[in-house]
Image (tube, rainbow, N blue to C red):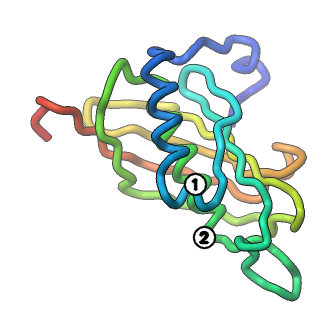
Amino acid sequence: MMTETSKHDLKPVLAPAFFAQVMQWFEALPHCKQLGIRYVSSSAGVVTLELPFSEAIIGNPETRVLHGGVVTTLIDTASGSAIYTLLPGPEGVATLDLRIDYLRPAKPDEPVFCTAECYRMTEHIAFTRATAYQDDINKPVAYAVGTFARTSAGKEG
């Protein structure tokens, strides 16, 4: 999660034109398109995405609470997107591990946001942390940490 200090020191994504293409690609993925996941904001190492509420993503018809799988998809997509804010060009990124602590159910009829940060990157692995929330990032729906494999064309893995 971003600290108060880091909010004031935001730097732009490394390659804005490339990152814009990546976000268009993410939003066009069939599962992201079906869920309506959309880009909200970014800076170097950080991305915020939005998952709008819809009746189709309710997990429990009695309580109208969102299905945990759609929150997982939002977190995974935001975490992967955060990595691309730090890359100069095309590179494959694959989820190796994603650990999510669900802290409370997402309220019905409200969007869910996810702010993800790539806090460390090595030649082969990227490390992320993310917060899914609704109206207040300090009242999270879930926290997550992830590791992602990095592979680029022409680089032996």
Q: Quadrant of residue 104?
A: bottom right
Asked if 109 appears above or below 129 in the picture, the reply is: below
Q: Position of residue 144 (x, y in %)?
A: 60, 53
The residue positioned 33% from the left and 39% from the top of the image is: 125
Mark 1, mark 2: which one is toward the viewer? Answer: 1
| Residues at marks 1 and 2, CA–CA distance in whole angstroms | 15 Å
Query: Is tag 1's residue or tag 2's residue first in the polypeptide sequence?
Result: 1
Dot 1 crowding, Cα within 10 Å, few <14, some 14–19, many 20+: few
Report the front residue among 110 and 21.
21
Q: Which mark is residue 124?
A: none
Q: Is residue 38 left or right of residue 64?
A: left
* Residue on which disc 1 sits: 33
Kind of element beneath mark 2: helix
Query: Which amino acid type corresponds to the residue marked 1 in the rendered image?
Result: Lys
The residue positioned 75% from the left and 13% from the top of the image is: 8
Kind of element beneath mark 1: helix
Question: In the current view of this chain or complex, which residue is farthest to the bottom?
Answer: 62
Report the front residue among 75 and 53.
53
Asked if 16 appears above or below 65 in the picture, the reply is: above
Q: Is residue 38 left or right of residue 92?
A: right
Asked if 73 appears above or below 119 in the picture, the reply is: below
Q: Position of residue 91 (x, y in %)?
A: 29, 33
Asked if 93 appears above or below 19 in the picture, the reply is: below
Which quadrant is the N terminus positioned in? top right
Q: Position of residue 35 (x, y in %)?
A: 64, 60
* Residue on which disc 2 sits: 69
The residue positioned 77% from the left and 59% from the top of the image is: 141
The residue positioned 53% from the left and 49% from the top of the image is: 77
Q: Position of residue 16 (x, y in %)?
A: 50, 16
